Each structure stands twice: as structure tokens, then as C-alpha cells.
Amino acid sequence: MLLAACSGGPGRRAAEGAAGRGSAAKGATAGTVRRPLPGSGPVGGRMVVRRGAFAPSEGSGVVASRSQPGVVWAIRDGGESQPGRPRAALYAYELAGDRLGELPGGRRLRAVPVPGTTHVDWEDLAADDQGNLWIADIGDNACRRSSITLYKVREPSPSAAGARLLATYRYR
């Protein structure tokens, strides 16, 4: 079952941006990853990343890689594409204990574009047991969308030039 809802409306305050929606962005220290909470996920818990490919208010879904130990994938919620930091991309981070480590090539993060997708308002990211990542383009802050989209992508290597889109599911 796929559920989506708009978050705008008369009762919503504009100041309740992405940093105010979830506890993940509150109280984090710039450039660090919080120590994981035991037993609450594939890499042992929750983490907070405050600097990287995009501003914390533009970060959205995060999921641990199922095929590459220590790698975490993230997506952007919004913002404009910039050279080396496209909007419609998966972002790979390497965890080294409770800090960001280096990916091959000495980078702390790597953007892997997802050709064939449209980024309206990506909100969540998940991994399945078959080696795929699922990107949920379900955001609707203004309550104006007539459809939402779910993308199925083969999990790439962090050094890949692009991720392979396997399927697109549109819902009205």
C-alpha cells in the first residue's frame, strides 16, 4: 500500500520547514554523524548528517546499502541542481564509525544521477532484498499534485556514472 498526503494547508506555518518536521535534524553538530542507536536499523541505528551534498533542510530519505557495507544512500527533497550535485540523484556517503569516511577517490560523498526520472518532490527512499532502491516522489507541500510516482532503481555502486531505472509506477 502506498500512502501520500499534502502537508500544506491553512494550518501549516511556513517556518515548519524540513528541519522542523523530524527529530533527525535537531541538535546535530555540523559535519558529524550521531552515534547509532542500538538495534534500530540495518547499520545499527539513526544518524544525522548536517553537511554534505545539500542543506539539511533539503535532505530527505536515507537508507543503508544492502550490498555495500558502510555505504548510506540519501536523496534531495528539493533545491536547484548544481554542477556535481544534481537534484535527481542518489547520494552515497561512507560511514566510518560515527563519522563520514571517504569513498573511493577520496570523496566524502558522491552523486549518482538517476536518468529517466523526474524530481517533483522526492520524499523517501527504501531498499528491498533484491538489490533495488525505491524512490518515492510523493511530496505535495502545496496540495496541488494530481499524481505521485514511485521509482524502482537497481542499487548502483557509489562510483557508477548513473543508476539503472527498472520501473516507474504512477498513481493518481
Image (cartoon, grey):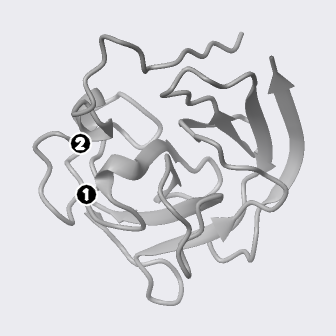
* Quadrant location, the N terminus: top right
Q: Check disc 2 and report the residue beneath it.
A: 25
What secondary structure is marked by label 2?
helix
The residue that appears at 49% across and 46% down in the rendered structure is: 77
Q: Amino acid at mark 1?
A: Arg
Residue 19, above or below 65? above
Would you say the residues marked 2 and 1 are in contact, meaning their CB atoms lie under 8 Å apart? yes
Label 1: how many Cα within 10 Å (few below 14, some 14–19, many 20+)? many
Residue 120 in sight from this viewpoint: yes
The residue that appears at 74% across and 22% down in the rendered structure is: 146
Label 2: how many Cα within 10 Å (few below 14, some 14–19, many 20+)? some
Residue 94 or residue 3, whichever sits in front: 3
The residue that appears at 84% across and 28% down in the rendered structure is: 170
- Residue 169 lies in quadrant: top right
Residue 68 or residue 7, whichever sits in front: 7
Residue 109 or residue 2, whichever sits in front: 2
Q: Amino acid at mark 2?
A: Ala
The residue that appears at 23% across and 42% down in the rendered structure is: 25
Q: Position of residue 93 (x, y in %)?
A: 45, 64
Tell me, for residue 50, which label it has, or none.
1
* Quadrant location, the C terminus: top right
Q: Position of residue 155 (x, y in %)?
A: 72, 54
Distance of label 2 from label 1 (alpha carbons): 7 Å
Would you say 53 lies left or right of 28 here?
A: right
